[in-house]
Image (cartoon, grey):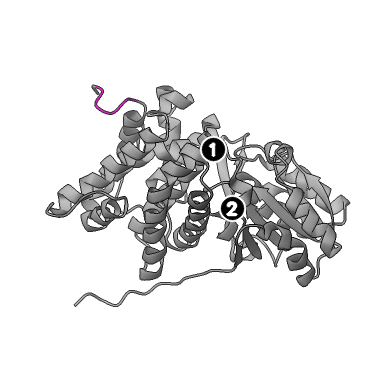
Amino acid sequence: MAPVQEFQFLHGTKVVAGPGSAGSIGEELRGLGATRALIVTDRGVAGAGLLASVVEGLERAGVTHEVFDEVEPNPLAETTDRGAARARAGGCDAVIAVGGGSSIDCAKVIAVIGKFGGAARDYEGFDTVPDLPLPLVAVPTTVGTGSEVTRGAVISDAGRRLKMVVVTPRIFPRIAVLDPLLLMQLPAPVTAATGMDSLTQAIEGYVSRNASPITDALNLEALRMIAANLRLAVARNDLAALAALQIATTMQGIGFHNAGLGLVHAMSNTVGGIFGAPHGVTNAIILPHVMEFNLAADPVKFARVAEAMGEPVAGLSVREAAERSVAAVRVLSSDIRIPPTLADVGVTAEAIPEMTEKAMRNIDAPTNPRNYSEADIAELYRRCLKPVGAPA
């Protein structure tokens, strides 16, 4: 008989979902005692008019606001510090993140600095935040990351050419608002990239060394929902498909931040820190290569991944079914026009030694299901730089 598993499970965010739910944020903030909010976003989201329903809800509730729209992809520590300065100068007692994972992660650290002062780099690491920061409402406008329900933030440090993390239960957003109407203008490439980020996290969380029955249930069902809806969402911005992806992203966000991730994220975060490549795209490129590497560690779970992605596995051996999971990811990526190699997003072979060294030290690596070495990671990077089937 197998030993009874021991594990912990954390979730600290209220989830409010449904079309038009962004209009309720003002009342939610009033319930938290807030009267003035800093909206953290990027210029694309602001320019698309996606703040309108949020602002209208704030005005109805009598909550004043100002907007900080300087967040870039892979947000910089300096950007975070400027946003926090705006929050402090404006007397803001709450923060609202409207955007993708970059805006939400940036807002998490802005809420910390806005309450306690200092700079983003002061809070790098685990449990460095002394108490609860300013209350944060997270409003995702993409279908990736799951940052709206996690206790971590990833911020780029350009000087060190890496992504630093701030991780503590104290930075859970108080509320996540899932309004699918805010997804209707998503460009297809953004839906594709963020959807593959979500898929990657569901798979890595499912096969992680720290997975539990609770995280398995969340991640596997999220995987099913993503695989069933991502093509349609990319093809024509179908509202029902986008809403399903939005909910699946939140589910796997709760799942993976309890289970951990693996080498895909360790390698992808390193690529992003050095080259600034889009996180979801690099995840999608690296994912099937790492899955092939990891298959032997847990073929039963990879066979279930294949089944969840709609692969016909009846009558196959466990190993054959597990291999179908890799093929399913490659076909999905191709269908939604994810580029096939890291070279396509500007990564060069000359950076492999630096990338390998940093990926080995990345916090996501230890929960990878298979043991690995520097040589393994370097070889995986080499494979990711070439088309599948190209000579070594």
- Can I make out residue 373 in this image? no
Magenta stretch, residue numbers: 386-390
Q: CA distance from mark 1 to mark 2?
A: 15 Å
Quarter of the image for residue 14 reads bottom right
What mark, if any, has residue 38 been given in the picture? Answer: none
**The one of 36 and 52 positioned closer to us in this rendering:** 52
Q: In what quadrant of the picture does the C terminus appear?
A: top left
Q: Which residue is mark 1?
A: 190
- On the image, the x and y values in percent for residue 273 come to 54, 36
Q: 325 or 84: nearer the eye?
A: 325
* Residue at the (29%, 43%) spot, across then down: 328
Question: Quick check: 132 above or below 57?
Answer: below
Q: Looking at the picture, does residue 260 appear above or below residue 8?
A: above
Predominant secondary structure, magenta span:
loop
* Horizontal and vertical percent position of residue 378: 34, 34
Q: Which residue is mark 2?
A: 180
